[in-house]
Image (tube, coloured by chain):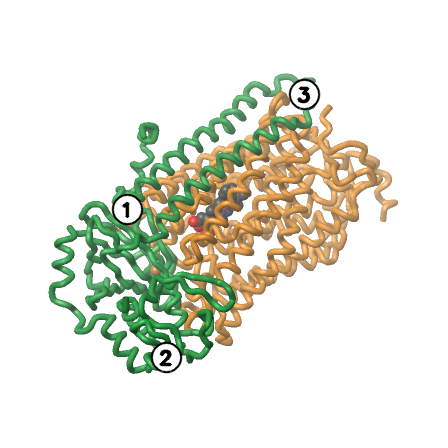
Chain colours: A orange, B green
Amino acid sequence: MSSAHTKTEHGHADHNYLNHGSGIWSWMTTLDHKRIGLMYFATVATLFLIGGFFALGIRLHLAKFGAEPLLDPDTYNKFMTFHGAIMVFMVIIPGIPAFLGNFVLPIQLGAKDVAFPRLNLASYYIFIAGAAIAASSMIFNQVDTGWTFYTPYSTAKTSNGVILLVLGAFTMGFSSILTGLNFIVTTHKLRAPGMTMDRIPLMIWALYSTSIIQILATPILAITLLLIGAEKTLGVGIFDPDLGGDPVLFQHFFWFYSHPAVYIMILPAMGVISELITAFSKKTIFGYRAIAYSSVAIAAVSFLVWGHHMFVSGQSTIAGIVFSIITMFVGVPTAIKLFNWISTMYRGTVTFEAPMLFALGFMFLFTIGGLTGVFLASTGMDVHFHDTYFVVAHFHYVMVGGTLMALMGGILYWFPKMFGRMTSDLGGRISWVLIFTGFNVTFFPQFVLGAMGMPRRYFDYLPEYTNLNQISTVGSWLIGLGFLVGLITIIHGIFKGEKATDNPWGAKTLEWQTSSPPPHENFINTPTVTAGPYDFR
Amino acid sequence: MSWSSLIPATSFMPIQATEIAKEVDLLYAFLIIASLVSFVILIGGMTWFLIKFKRTSLDQKSAYITHNNFAEFLWSFIPLVIMMGIFYWGMVIFEKLRTPPEDVAAEIHVTAEQWAWTYRYANGKEFYSSANDPMIIPAGKATKLILTSKDVIHSFYVPAFRTKQDAVPGKLTQLWFEPKQPGEYIVFCTEYCGTKHSGMMIKIKAIPSEEYAAWYHAEKKGADTPADLGKTLFAQKACASCHSIDGSRVVGPTMKGLFGSERKFTDGTKTKADENYLRESILVSSAKIVETYPAAMPLFQGQLSDEDVANLIEYIKSIK
Ligand code: HEM
Ligand SMILES: [Cu+2]
């Protein structure tokens, strides 16, 4: 096989991973991490459209434009649940690691593939199976618990559809664990000669820390979800007080996974941002070690702060205080990263292609999201804000503003490598303007709504909240339009984009040293690494 | 404080109906100013760099700077100090929000269910919220709520008081507040509880405390007070065979002065006897055994309804 590639030493490979086998079957059975990455892309993008449909529905309903409400309360609650569950478990959690991570990680390490290619393919199918099981709950027996599945509502008061949804999430958890395991082993075992741990790109540090969280935290979710299933089907009394259980125990279990999970969502995004900022500033990243170690620090501390979701749950006052102080400690490594990225731009030579605009958008939105996190971490303040729209705004700023901005930036950045073609820069820019503006118009008013006291997950609200809700709804249309333009730009790029060179951005990491698109096994000759990843001297 | 009135921060907040609301808003104003300053430093600094270091020609070279220990120390240390300050400030307010004063003028048992609230006063007055009765409380005096739920978790949120607390089935939680002025304040349910979650609103009506006293003593709704009912149960369930009410030692601890006293347990832990402790001790006495007493009390779990337990607690509270 390797001999087939030797004729194309560099550049214009006529033989690459995309044409290394043709037909749908060669894709479905591929062991190539790059193809698996793209299959995740197609899957996650489809799920994102479905989740987005529910989001627009929720917002349209809340605008109360007509005299009649658009949805009835039960339908609204189902929309809210499916939107959250799809976006969290099927889009934001797998988005960057499973799609971009799968595509980029082995190439950045100078490896031929991940350590366990078969397991990688299996992870993909496990994900599909989980998504299918979860989706069947939409069709058969709809769920209205919200993505947090709080007991005893989920176990005692609602339809059995919950079982399907948690079973789906449980299954997808395995995919997440296996991908994490694969990445960790790959990072340790398959680095190119000369690539020491302090020469791996920051994207890899981010994926590595994420993988640790995935492996350690996901089993807790899995067990918790199984217990819900057991309680619902067998009547085991763990969470339901009528059966002798404790509902607050569920919250402890749930957040013990789900708090670290928010870092599963954001750490990979931070990895992408680190790559984009150096590449478009043409300058070595500032504070490589600080960024790398702060990822690991965030991963570690993220396990100790779950109780900050439960300040008013009835847990003791002292527990609240302890969780509050530890939460403040997570804020510090987060702040460090922002300072490092900004310093990277200092005395660089910055250009503003579409991927960089998304990185800058990330900085803007993430800063607002992070600062409002400090409001919530402060116990006396959170008592007022907990379960209001302030929280909704906070986590959309960090998760959506952060993760989706990074995801879009990352797609446009690695697009030439994936498809050997460029996307239209103008298309990317228009998409950015719409998403960025729409995002702020949608979510900023929600901070104000939260301060005014509007609770989250409300089908209906007091008249004084109407104007801000309507502004928010109009913003959601801009976001929708922005992603539509983004999608068109991507599809256009795949079929009609200009041919890309091997290294269109002049970046330094290894994936830019092979051809665009890369050959089946990434490099024709295994590269040898002699310097750090961002050596813009 | 003058700086806090510089920004209209508090104008987005609901009215400040309690002293604590003012304190919360002061912290809020501080957080907004501190966030604005941080935002300007971060994003303003970034924008300035972007303009200043924009690439203008193809052969331009960037500086080679890898790190700077001093800067990195500063921007880790300064945020840490600020955040510790915010933590402490929040904690002080939190403790006030969570600790009711010794003398409360009204104590109300609130039971949530899908999708209504019931409130029961110490003298037996009882209201079901869907009857559109506001919760009447005295203005200028502290009110304490003892919350629980019949079915799923709900949460009692009063924006004007900047406070909320979950009502958890199988558990008693508490909340207190002291509105300064007479007035009507809205209460939301903030823990998602199903179809009519957003419709689960009630009003709190604070009235001058003399008026409250008159209202409270006027025509009782229930014949017996919860404490009376508890007394009957105490006799029926033969509690008195092990517990005295006059301070003397029988098999178990006396009920006299029990509420609010400090309990020490055989495993070395301690707790103050509040409603939740009493509830647990009645239902599952084996959970915590008071020092020097045998673990002799039968389980009452399953034999007493939530209401029975609440009545017993009120009776025990009355034995001073
Ligand atoms: C790093 C990116 C972050 C992500 C992805 C994130 C994500 C989230 C999410 C999803 C929630 C809401 C969960 C729910 O109830 O549905 C949340 C709430 C919260 N976040 Fe963040 N967050 C981030 C940063 C921060 C920071 C830096 C802090 C504090 C310094 C913070 C403090 C909090 C607190 C205290 C809550 C609970 C609020 C409440 O429910 O009352 N977050 N966050
Ligand atoms: Cu409720």
The type of residue carrying mark 2 is: Cys
The type of residue carrying mark 3 is: Ala
Picture coordinates of residue A158 (x, y %)?
Answer: 41, 67
Q: CA distance from mark 2 to mark 1?
A: 46 Å
Please name which of the two marks, 3 or 1, marks the residue nearer to the observer: 1
Q: Which residue is mark 2?
A: B242
Which chain does tag 2 point to?
B
Q: Which residue is mark 1?
A: B160
Q: Residue at x 64, y 17 (%)?
A: B57
Q: Is residue A82 left or right of residue A168?
A: left
Rate crowding at label 2 as few (under 14), some (14 to 19) or many (20 or more) other CA atoms within 10 Å: some
Q: Which residue is mark 3?
A: B63
Q: Do the numbered discs 3 and 1 sit on residues whose CB atoms are within 8 Å?
A: no
Picture coordinates of residue A522 (x, y %)?
Answer: 77, 43
Asked if badge 3 and badge 2 are on a common chain, one would say yes
Q: Do the numbered discs 3 and 2 sit on residues whose CB atoms are within 8 Å?
A: no
The type of residue carrying mark 1 is: Ala
Q: Is residue A484 visible?
A: no
Picture coordinates of residue A503 (x, y %)?
Answer: 71, 32
Q: Is residue B177 left or right of residue A443?
A: left
Rate crowding at label 1 as few (under 14), some (14 to 19) or many (20 or more) other CA atoms within 10 Å: many
